Amino acid sequence: MKTKLQHHLENELDREFLNKNIFFNKNISKLTWFGVGGLAEVLFIPQSSKDLIKVLKLINTNTTINVIGLGSNILIRDGGLNGITIRLSKNFNFINENDESIVSGAAVPDKVFSKYCYEKSITDCEFLYGIPGTIGGAIAMNAGCYGSEISDVVYSFKCIDFEGNETIIKNSEQTFSYRKNNFLKNHIVTEVEIKKNHGDKDQIKEKMNDINARRLDSQPQKVRTGGSTFKNPTSQVTDKKTWELIKPYLNEVVCPDGVSMSKKHANFIINTQTKSSNIIEDFGERIIEKVLEKTGVQLEWEIQIKGQR
Ligand SMILES: Cc1cc2nc3c(=O)[nH]c(=O)nc-3n(C[C@H](O)[C@H](O)[C@H](O)COP(=O)(O)OP(=O)(O)OC[C@H]3O[C@@H](n4cnc5c(N)ncnc54)[C@H](O)[C@@H]3O)c2cc1C
């Protein structure tokens, strides 16, 4: 049986638009790195900002809206996502250049963007080479590694709010903090303008290789994970990294079948064979409890958990 939202969209949109862009009761587990999670009531893959605005203006303001990129930092619960889930189409996967900046569509994978910069001898985006998300996801999460984050290289980003209004946010508005963008609550990032700093091509390559080598050395490869599960605490709380807080007590946390903490990195939860995101979430909650009990530090999820249990 169709939901009210599904009926509404069927009534308001023509068949061609629906066939191309809208999917009902779609299993989106395959769109996430963890590979688990329930159905999306509506999955919307807009072909353009115009399409996106059209649908946003059609729906009731209290409809739940979720945005996903490459799903590398998301855990979707088993009960799935109510409302509309938006994933930008490949038409948002473009890179344009002008004299002072590079404009990237939000669906461009970080790795692709970083390689583009290397080809053009543009520096400071080497760190993106190892991050497995999109440029849009990087803006939402202020993604970064090894001392750099996307906020260091951004001039501005364009986004559309859930009511269909387009805005450009400048970096000077200081919306970024650690693994967070404080402005983006009800917005979809569509485009990002990035600083164009020229550098030496060989040095850029060396930096990218170095980042790659560090990752291979310290992180599990080719596994179902969401990357760092919890944020690192601030230096006011402790000098220790999250993995250092977790590692000594890991044996004291009951590890369910099909889920484990990486042996290489004690802040990477790995889905070895579970089909249930709830099991992964519960395991994470038990780690939070254990670390709090043993160290007094309250860990905070970095992974974005979405949907109904
Ligand atoms: C193996 C591995 C290694 C990782 N290493 C790092 C690392 O070194 N540093 C780091 O920072 N992260 C790392 N991550 C986490 C992840 O890759 C980043 O957070 C990435 O930026 C998420 O991008 P995504 O497109 O996959 O977003 P998703 O995981 O799909 O979504 C993440 C969040 O961003 C929001 N979002 C996504 N796209 C948009 C958009 N267009 N507009 C508005 N909101 C949006 C979503 O709603 C969600 O809240 C790693 C993950 C994995 C699996």
Image (spheres, helix red, strand yellow):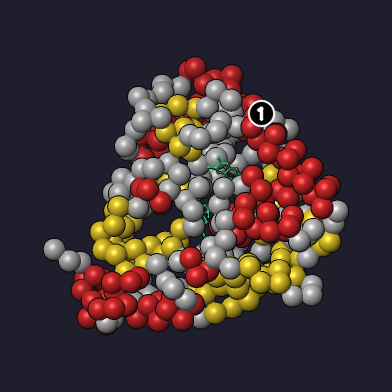
Q: Is residue 243 above or below residue 168?
A: above
- Report x, y in % for residue 108: 57, 61
Q: Is residue 38 visible?
A: yes
Asked whether, in this view, residue 46 is left or right of residue 14, the answer is right
Q: Residue drawn at (33%, 71%), measured in percent from left and top?
A: 20
Q: Residue drawn at (48%, 38%), measured in percent from left and top?
A: 225
Residue at the spot of label 1: 217
- Report x, y in % for residue 237: 69, 37
Front-lying residue, 215 or 96: 96
Residue 199 sits in which quadrant?
bottom right
Q: Is residue 92 above or below residue 264?
A: below
Q: Quick one: quadrant of the N terminus?
A: bottom left
- Report x, y in % for residue 191: 60, 70
Question: The disc labelled 1 sits on which kind of residue?
Answer: Asp
Asked which secondary structure carries label 1, the reply is helix
Most distant residue in the left direction: 1
Asked whether, in this view, residue 220 is left or right of residue 115, the answer is left
Front-lying residue, 53 or 48: 48
Q: Residue drawn at (60%, 59%), measured in percent from left and top?
A: 135
Q: Residue drawn at (57%, 56%), measured in percent from left and top?
A: 109
User: How many numbered marks have been drawn onto this rendered protein structure?
Assistant: 1
Residue 208 sits in which quadrant?
top right
Query: Is ligand 1 less than 8 Å from the beta carbon at label 1?
Result: no
Judge the density around disc 1: few (<14), some (14-19), many (≥20) Cα neighbours within 10 Å. few
Q: Is residue 289 visible?
A: no
- Report x, y in % for residue 41: 28, 61
